[in-house]
Amino acid sequence: MDFKKYVRDIENFPKQGVGFKDITPLLKDPAAFKAASEELLRFIGDEKVDVVVGMESRGFFYGPVLALALNAGFVPVRKVGKLPHHKISHTYDLEYGTDTLEIHADAINTGDRVVIHDDVLATGGTAKATCQLIEALGGVVVQCNFLLELTTLRGASKLDGYVVNSLMRY
């Protein structure tokens, strides 16, 4: 299936000069949504997975779908102040400042095999920070999967040493 035909380009969003890849047409089409889910599951193959971690907010679309299909748990990684229980955080650099992600401290058990999912791999900072959070809790990152990758931003280079898969590349 040509998944790219379900991705809409929005110029100058969320700010001037930024091109946004809108996946809502893909999510709206049941056949495309299902086919993309199946392709993302093919990346995982026969790997044993205990937990799928999805990053706020676009990792929340496919992350739970993958977790259910894998009979695994789903754990959200959120921006600061969104999680109510004891948590750990990781601050990382962006092109224009810093950001911080948090995960509940009891969300990952030592030895848990984790698939990280986000819908977009851009600069790689969010994914790398998430890998570091998982590992700080004793988890093992099996792979990092993305619906689409913006290759010109070279985000995969920040994930050197991890298995990285992207369904679409731009």
Image (cartoon, helix red, strand yellow):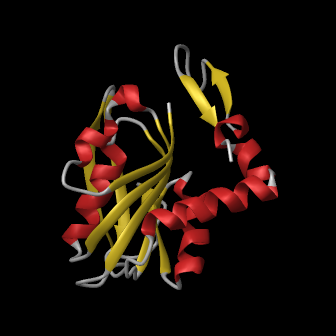
| Residue 103 located left or right of residue 68 | left
How many numbered marks, from 0 up?
A: 0
User: Going 49% across and 61% down the picture, which residue do you hit?
Assistant: 82
Residue 161 spot, x, y in % from top left:
19, 54
Residue 14 visible (yes or no): no
Rendering quarter of residue 4: top right
Which residue occupies the extreme front position in the image?
1
Q: In the image, is residue 165 above or below residue 16?
A: below
Residue 47 visible (yes or no): yes
Foreground pick, 128 / 79: 128
Residue 92 spot, x, y in % from top left:
26, 44
Rendering quarter of residue 89: bottom left
Which residue occupies the extreme top position in the image?
17
Q: In the image, is residue 115 above or below residue 13?
A: below
| Residue 138 located left or right of residue 23 | left
Q: In the image, is residue 122 above or below residue 27?
A: above
Residue 58 spot, x, y in % from top left:
56, 51
User: Going 68% across and 48% down the picture, which residue do you hit?
Assistant: 1
User: Going 38% across and 25% down the picture, which residue do you hit?
Assistant: 152
Foreground pick, 37 / 23: 37
User: Going 50% across and 54% down the picture, which residue do you hit?
Assistant: 56
Residue 8 spot, x, y in % from top left:
70, 31
Q: In the image, is residue 65 above or below residue 111?
A: above
| Residue 64 located left or right of residue 29 | left
| Residue 22 located left or right of residue 76 | right
